[in-house]
Image (spheres, grey):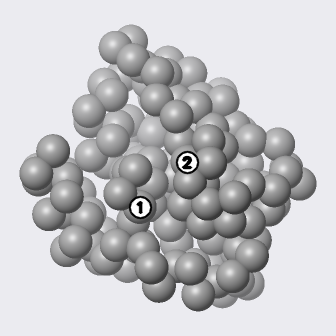
Amino acid sequence: MSNVPANLKYAASHEWMLLNADGSVTVGITDHAQEALGDLVFVELPEVGAHFDAEKEIAVVESVKAAADVYAPIAGTVTEVNQAAADAPESVNQDAYSAWLFKMTPDNVADLDKMLDAAAYQGLADAA
């Protein structure tokens, strides 16, 4: 069973989001996603300053089994990337919630309210 922290929001496409005190949102892939992919060998991060619409491809993670697109869960501008995750993709396998991929400033922070809570995401992950 995957780890699904209660303090995060989730997208059906298996990204997690954390609203930070400064209004930015930290984004990564869920524990369920990294388990399904297997050992990650490559992480491609977005460019800082780039704007993405919700549900558009923003990053790529590759494992020995498959490559998977990571989608922007909400619309916003990338403000920071976690180069450590790109340098050591296995860190995402070790702790998907510490090895975030990028931070963004949301166009509308209220969009987070439309995301899944932990219980709803757990139900989705269990059904997969």
Q: Position of residue 101 (x, y in %)?
A: 60, 47
**Residue, x 62% and y 41% (percent of image)?**
57
| Mark 1 secondary-structure assignment | loop
For disc 2, the neighbor class at 10 Å (few under 14, some 14 to 19, many from 20) is: many
| Quarter containing the C terminus | top left
Alpha carbon distance from label 2 to label 1: 9 Å
For disc 1, the neighbor class at 10 Å (few under 14, some 14 to 19, many from 20) is: many
Q: Which amino acid, by three-letter code, is at mark 2?
A: Tyr
**Residue that carries the numbered disc 1 in the rendered image:** 11
Q: Position of residue 98 (x, y in %)?
A: 48, 54
Locate residue 120 relative to residue 90 in the image: left or right: left
Locate residue 114 relative to residue 4 in the image: left or right: right
- Single out the residue that lies furthest toward the right: 49
Can residue 88 be seen in this snapshot? no
- Residue 113's place in the image compared with 67, above or below, is below
Q: Which amino acid, by three-letter code, is at mark 1?
A: Ala
Can residue 1 be seen in this snapshot? yes
| Mark 2 secondary-structure assignment | strand
What is the tally of numbered marks visible in this picture?
Answer: 2
**Residue, x 34% and y 72% (percent of image)?**
116
- Single out the residue that lies furthest toward the top: 64
Asked if the residue at tag 1 contacts the one at tag 2, i.e. Cβ–Cβ closer than 8 Å, the answer is: yes
**Residue, x 59% and y 87% (percent of image)?**
110
Which label number is shown at residue 126?
A: none
Which is nearer the N-term, disc 2 or disc 1? Answer: 1
Locate residue 46 relative to residue 39 in the image: left or right: right
**Residue, x 45% and y 48% (percent of image)?**
29
**Residue that carries the numbered disc 2 in the rendered image:** 71
Locate residue 81 relative to residue 41 in the image: left or right: right
Residue 115: quadrant of the picture: bottom left
